Image (spheres, grey):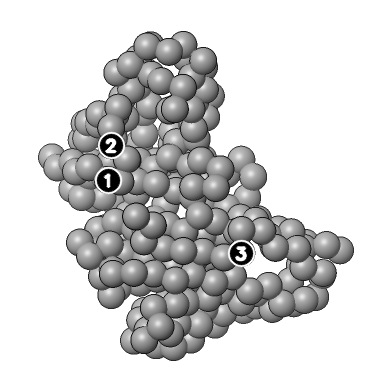
């Protein structure tokens, strides 16, 4: 049973455009909801995370929007750059709070 | 600062062979994890260790065993490898589980092919 549904599977954006990736979760612990970024041949690395008691968190060009009632959260990348080309994963904590369910990933390509 | 180190980086096995993936972290983290990554499946948790001396099953534990050797090291063993275990394996660690900060620190992965 898939606990976190991520879309789209792949995304192509022009340089300077906005990239939007969405995730929907089911029953989880209410702790942190992170986004991870993974470059080819590397392990994932934390990009940005949000607590569910806030609706939005912004760090530079990256923003997480959180909708607790809809059980959805999204990643917005403003002014997308070719260096942002990577795979992005959302995650939601399991009810035990010590594990994550990861989404299936979104491959982002930013065209110069 | 090495962070999370995995060995080997690449391995080819024949069906039925056994092997152990090694993982070590130098950040004094309490919790350690093994994930596998497959195309279209994302990252799936195999086993985790919340603290030294404890291990628990994740989403896909069948065919694997783990050992938390000490606070630094967490190994993953395939007793009888199968082609379905062809994957990229990631070890990760966190200070105290994932709920407090949302941050896992990942190694660079071990790419395993089972023929």
Alpha carbons under labels 3 and 1: distance apart: 26 Å
Depth order, front residue of A108/B20? A108
Residue A67 locus on image (x, y percent): 43, 85
In the drawing, what numbered circle is on residue B61?
2
Q: Nearer the viewer, mark 3 or mark 1?
A: 3
Q: Is disc 3 surrounded by few (<14), some (14 to 19) or many (20+) residues within 10 Å?
A: some
Q: Is residue B80 left or right of residue A50?
A: left
Circles 2 and 3 on the same chain: no
Residue A27 locus on image (x, y percent): 28, 69
Residue A46 locus on image (x, y percent): 48, 61
Q: Is residue A103 left or right of residue A82?
A: left
Residue B64 locus on image (x, y percent): 29, 29
Q: Are marks 2 and 1 in contact (CB under 8 Å)?
A: yes
> Residue at 42% of width from left, 57% of height from top?
A102
Depth order, front residue of B84/B104? B84
Q: Secondary structure at mark 2?
A: loop
Q: Is residue B97 above or below residue A56?
A: above
> Residue at 22% of width from left, 65% of height from top?
A95
> Residue at 27% of width from left, 41% of height from top?
B47
Alpha carbons under labels 2 and 3: distance apart: 28 Å
Q: Is disc 2 surrounded by few (<14), some (14 to 19) or many (20+) residues within 10 Å?
A: some
Q: How many marks?
A: 3
Circles 2 and 1 on the same chain: yes
Can residue A45 be seen here? no
Q: Is residue B7 above or below residue A73?
A: above
Q: Is residue B43 left or right of residue B58?
A: right
Q: Nearer the viewer, mark 2 or mark 3?
A: 3
Depth order, front residue of A90/A59? A90
Depth order, front residue of B27/A79? A79
Residue identifier under label 3: A8
Alpha carbons under labels 2 and 1: distance apart: 6 Å
Q: Is disc 1 surrounded by few (<14), some (14 to 19) or many (20+) residues within 10 Å?
A: some
């Amino acid at each position: 049973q898939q606990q976190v549904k991520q879309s789209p599977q792949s995304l192509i954006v022009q340089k300077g455009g906005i990239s939007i990736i969405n995730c929907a979760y089911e029953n989880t612990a209410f702790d942190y909801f992170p986004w991870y970024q993974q470059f080819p041949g590397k392990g994932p690395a934390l990009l940005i995370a949000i607590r569910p008691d806030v609706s939005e968190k912004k760090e530079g060009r990256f923003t997480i929007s959180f909708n607790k009632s809809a059980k959805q959260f999204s990643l917005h990348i403003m002014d997308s750059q070719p260096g942002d080309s990577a795979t992005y994963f959302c995650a939601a904590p399991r009810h035990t709070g010590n594990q994550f369910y990861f989404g299936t990933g979104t491959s982002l390509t930013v065209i110069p | 600062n090495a962070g999370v180190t995995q060995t080997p980086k690449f391995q080819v096995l024949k069906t039925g062979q056994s092997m152990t993936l090694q993982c070590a972290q130098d950040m004094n983290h309490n919790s350690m994890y093994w994930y596998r990554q497959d195309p279209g499946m994302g990252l799936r948790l195999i086993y985790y260790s919340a603290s030294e001396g404890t291990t628990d099953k994740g989403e896909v534990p069948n065919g694997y065993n783990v050992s938390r050797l000490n606070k630094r090291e967490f190994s993953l063993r395939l007793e009888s490898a199968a082609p379905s275990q062809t994957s990229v394996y990631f070890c990760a660690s966190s200070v105290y589980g994932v709920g407090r900060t949302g941050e896992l620190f990942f190694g660079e992965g071990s790419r395993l092919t089972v023929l």
